[in-house]
Amino acid sequence: MPSLVRIWRRSIQTRVVTSTILLSTLVVALTGWALLRDVASGLADSRRAAAVSEARSGFDYAQTQLDAAVETEPSTQSQALTQMVDSLTRSRGAQRTYELVLQGPLLTDDGEVPIRSSAAIQPRALPADLAAAVRAGPGTFWRYSELSLVGSGSVEPSVVVGSQLRAPGSGDTYAMFYLFSLEDQQDTLDLVRRALLLGGLAMILMVGGVAWLVSRQVLDPVRLARRIAERYASGNLEQRMHVSGEDDIARLSTSFNQMAASLQSQIRRLENLSRLQQRFVSDVSHELRTPLTTVQMASEVLYDSRERFDPLTARSAELLKRELDRFESLLSDLLDLSRFDAGAAVLELDTIDFAQVARRAADDPVLARAGITVRLVGVERPALVEADPRRIDRIVRNLLANAAKYSGSDVVEVEVAQNAESASLSVRDFGVGLSGDENIRVFDRFWRADPARTQGGTGLGLAISREDAALHGGTLQAWGRPGVGSEFILTIPKPEGSAKHPPLESVYA
Ligand code: ADP
């Protein structure tokens, strides 16, 4: 069932064909029903008209017979009546299409009404209201009914025509009924119904087939367009749609091709622009390096002699040196990033042990000077990966320096763990933490939570660390809770492994 729902939701063709079939079934059913009703009432009406006129001539004949009768002896009168019924039913011989019932005289002393009929007819074949109308007075009345003979199971639709007769001699009244079978009309109706059903079915199938063909004609190019659009989405912009003719589909294909060409040229333009920008950043950083080194050397001289200056100049020399150091680290960060952007960064792989990296980082005198205690977890067992030792050290140093600079926490926990696929190293602090989407934004270039408190940072450290991790096919992710702390987890895949399922999960996740 779910797969049917899926097909219904995904395939326009299924929807078009199914709804066409449903709608045409409805139309065919309604038309068929109206047609059948018209045919049925037409057939019944014409048969009834013929039946009424046939019955009328019978009634006239019977009335003439009664008018002519002068006999008053009941037994001979009864004989005459039976003969009359016989002659009326015999007259048409084998072609007789009706049965005849004569009731009367209607008013007898003992309440018993004698009945003469051409066959043993079930009493319910004579509708009670018709019988009542006939008894009530003169005139010809008719009703549709069902004719069935005593001893036979078959029931045929019929039309019953009745009229009152009066014997002027005796003053008796009689009710005479003609029962015409509508069996032939029923057969014709059945035939028409079968023909309509078959014709309707064939038409629905044909309409369904046509809908399928037409929707295919329209949808094939759309499907082709979808496939090509998927290829564009996956970066392959070379593909073009085949254009033939001048119809809407051809125009769609042309617009599609124009869109692809325009996309391609825009992307090329942007790629060129981006390459130019990368080149510019890298060139500027390079060009600035030489004069910066000279200025830095000069500032070193001033800085070293600051004791001999008056306090204001000494302070200026200190500021000059600090900002020039920051400038230098900014330039080298920019150069690093431009190397990543240009795809020029290369890895110098070696086997390294994350446990050892963590121990070494913990011994960094900078942390001790900042009054930070490092807690090591999971460093008893080696966790070996193939990685560039310089880059891994840089990432870990950056994470620890950030914890020292920004978190305000005096304890930092470094944990190492591994599984068959990868090894992870986490740096967790218990300081200001990260709020909202800061765990994503910390990796943005030049982003700083509080630019006023830059602590000498450039806002590029984590961006570079993440590029370093990605260069290894690894990940660097951050989690945090405001006022509780933050955690950064570096995961590097083992050879043949992947960093998709890190062995460490953040406590803040
Ligand atoms: P920088 O190179 O200037 O240190 P980073 O890219 O390393 O910049 O960090 C960017 C910003 O992320 C920092 O300015 C700081 O606001 C925030 N940040 C980094 N580490 C932490 C941390 N452990 N706790 C709180 N904030 C942090």
Image: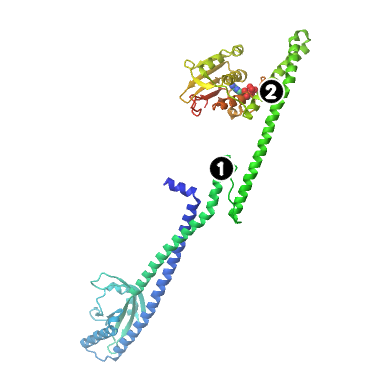
Judging by the rendered image, the residue that carries numbered circle 2 is 331
- Residue 387: x percent and y percent? 54, 22
Residue occupied by mark 1: 231
Asked where in the image residue 325 lies, by quadrant, the reply is top right
Whole-percent x, y for residue 184 in the image: 34, 74
Is label 2 in a helix, a strand or a loop? helix
Residue drawn at the location 75% of the way across and 20% of the way down: 291
What percent of the width, then of the height, locates residue 151? Answer: 23, 71
Give coordinates of residue 215: x percent, y percent: 51, 55
> What's the distance in space between the residues labelled 1 and 2, CA to CA?
40 Å
Q: Residue type at mark 2?
A: Leu
Of the residues shown, which amino acid type is indicated by label 1? Arg
Chain-order first, disc 1 or disc 2:
1
Q: Residue at x 24, y 73 (%)?
A: 150
Residue most extreme to the left: 75
| 277 sits left or right of 415 in the view | right
Q: Residues within 10 Å of mark 2 (few under 14, many from 20)?
A: many
CB of mark 2 near ligand 1 (< 8 Å): no
Q: Is residue 399 above or below residue 342?
A: above
